[in-house]
Structures are given as structure tokens and as C-alpha cells.
Image: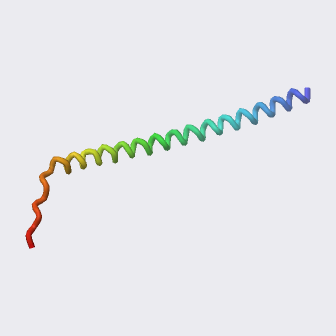
């Protein structure tokens, strides 16, 4: 019976380790998703700004 208890202990440790790793990966995914969403906001703002610049009349140079 000692072997069965040892196997159960290893199985429990393995389960704990793989669940911890899965939780870590989930946290990484959440952080990456937040970062991507923030970049999407910046990309959209930059795209609008570039579009505004391309449709703006060129400034008239001031004579000295």
C-alpha cells in the first residue's frame, strides 16, 4: 500500500504544479490582451491623426 500512497502524493504534486502553471499562463494572456487593447487605442488615435495631417492644407511659409 505504501507505493499507492506515494503515487497519489506524486499525482497530487503534479496536479498542483500544472494548475499553477495554467494559472500563470492565464494571467500572462490577460496581461497581453490588456496590452494589445491599449495598443489598439493608440493605433486608432495615430491613424486619425495621420489622416487629419494628410487632409490639412500645407502651412504657408512666413516671410522674414
Q: In the displayed orientation, state which residue is furthest to the bottom.
A: 64
Task: Residue 37 in the image: state x and y as whole percent.
Answer: 40, 42
Image side of residue 49 versus residue 61, left or right: right
Position of residue 4 relative to residue 51, above or below, is: above
Position of residue 41 relative to residue 59, above or below, is: above
Q: Nearer the viewer, residue 50 or 23?
A: 50
Image side of residue 49 versus residue 41, left or right: left
Q: Identify the residue at image location x=39%, y=45%.
A: 39
Quadrant of res 43: top left
Q: Identify the residue at image location x=58%, y=39%.
A: 25
Q: Quadrant of the N terminus?
A: top right
Q: Identify the residue at image location x=42%, y=42%.
A: 36
Q: In the displayed orientation, state which residue is furthest to the left.
A: 63
Q: Nearer the viewer, residue 61 or 34?
A: 61
Task: Residue 19 in the image: state x and y as whole percent.
Answer: 65, 35
Task: Residue 53 in the image: state x and y as whole percent.
Answer: 20, 51
Image side of residue 57 versus residue 31, left or right: left
Quadrant of res 26: top right
Image side of residue 44 versus residue 27, left or right: left
Q: Nearer the viewer, residue 25 or 20?
A: 25
What colour scheme was applied to this rendering of the protein?
rainbow
Quadrant of res 18: top right
Q: Identify the residue at image location x=86%, y=27%.
A: 4
Circle count: 0
Q: Quadrant of the C terminus?
A: bottom left
Task: Residue 40 in the image: state x and y as whole percent.
Answer: 36, 42
Amino acid at each position: 500500500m505504501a507505493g499507492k500512497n506515494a503515487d497519489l502524493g506524486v499525482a497530487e504534486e503534479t496536479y498542483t504544479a500544472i494548475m499553477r502553471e495554467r494559472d500563470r499562463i492565464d494571467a500572462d494572456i490577460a496581461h497581453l490582451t490588456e496590452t494589445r487593447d491599449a495598443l489598439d487605442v493608440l493605433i486608432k488615435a495615430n491613424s486619425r491623426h495621420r489622416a487629419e495631417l494628410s487632409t490639412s492644407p500645407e502651412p504657408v511659409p512666413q516671410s522674414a
